[in-house]
Every structure is written in structure tokens, then in C-alpha cells.
Image (cartoon, rainbow, N blue to C red):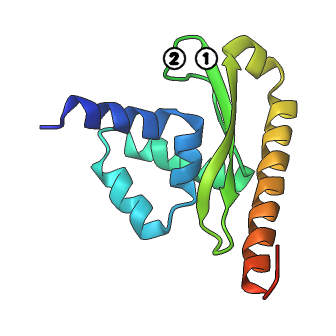
Amino acid sequence: TQSRSSAASDVYKRQVASGIVLMAWMPADERAALVAALDTDHAALEADLTACRANGFFYNGKGVVEGAAGVAAPVFGADGRALAAINISGPRDRVAAQIDSLSQQTVQTAARVTEELQRRTHNKRIPGGN
């Protein structure tokens, strides 16, 4: 059987916008193994992951915290792997009413962080780079 903390971790991985984003951009073999290990509706989760990759973000209108919602977008490292996610969350009604703006801001912020990480990584490879 699964421990309480492990079960809680599974809930967060599949119900929090940033968790969905990070899973969506995992290498396919890692993602498949993780999805298979989760106690969830695999078809629904795969549909969420596919939509997330297509849209560039994930909106979760039914967060783990009652009445909360969130939107997240991936931050990529120089190797193209998702390292983190930018997440904006708040009261469901407010987030839902502003989802177009919030998703755009989230994606743009994640892109700027990605660019900065890639710039810094590139500069470290150049002698004297900052």
C-alpha cells in the first residue's frame, strides 16, 4: 500500500497546475512511468498533459485548496528540459475571470526566465562570460 505522504504527493502531481506542467514536458518514457504509477484516471490525465503541451500552459480550475485555481507554464533549461514552472494562483472566480490575461502573463514570464537561464548558461561556457 501507498504511504500517506506518497499518496499526498501523487495528488499534488496530478492536480496542481505546476505539477501538470512539469509532467507534460518530462521525457516520454519518464512521463509514461509516472502516469502509470499514479492512482488516477489515466485517460483524463493524458488528455490534460496533451492539452498542456499544445497550449504551452495548464489552467487548473479545481485546485487542491477549496476555491482556488491556478495557471502554470514551463521554464526550460539550456538542454530543453522543463526545470520549473511559473504559477499564478488565487481565488477560482478571479482566476477564471482573467484566465486569458493570466495565462498570457504566465507564458511570457516563463519564456523570459527560460531566456535568462539559457543566456546565463551560454555565457558560462564562454571564457569571461557573465
**Which quadrant would the C terminus be assigned to in this image?**
bottom right
| Image quarter in which the N terminus is found | top left
User: Residue at label 1?
Assistant: 68
Residue 36 percent location from the top left of the image:
31, 53
Dot 2 alpha-carbon crowd within 10 angstroms: few under 14, some 14 to 19, many 20 or more: few
Where does residue 17 sit, x and y in percent of width and height?
59, 37
Q: Amino acid at mark 2?
A: Val
Residue 116: where, in percent of width, then height? 81, 62
Q: Is residue 110 left or right of residue 66?
A: right
Looking at the image, is 112 positioned above or below residue 105?
below
Looking at the rendered structure, the secondary structure element under dot 1 is strand
SS of the residue under disc 2 = loop
Residue at figure coordinates x 82%, y 32% from the top left: 102
Q: Position of residue 45 (x, y in %)?
A: 47, 44
Q: Nearer the viewer, residue 45 or 5?
A: 5
For the residue pair 10 and 119, the one nearer the viewer reads as: 119
In front: 16, or 121? 121
How many numbered callouts?
Answer: 2
Picture residue at 85% right of the left edge, 39% below the top: 105
| Depth check, front residue: 87 or 50 | 87
Give the alpha-carbon distance from disc 2 to disc 1, as whole Å: 6 Å
Q: Is residue 121 above or below residue 100?
A: below
Asked whether the viewer can see residue 48, the reply is no
Q: Residues within 10 Å of mark 1 (few under 14, many from 20)?
A: some
The answer to whether residue 124 is left or right of residue 33 is right
Badge 2 is on which residue?
A: 65
Q: Which residue is at 58% across, 41% downward?
A: 18
Decide: marks 2, 1 in contact (CB < 8 A)? yes
The answer to whether residue 80 is above or below residue 15 is below
Whether residue 6 is visible: yes
- The amino acid pointed to by label 1 is Ala
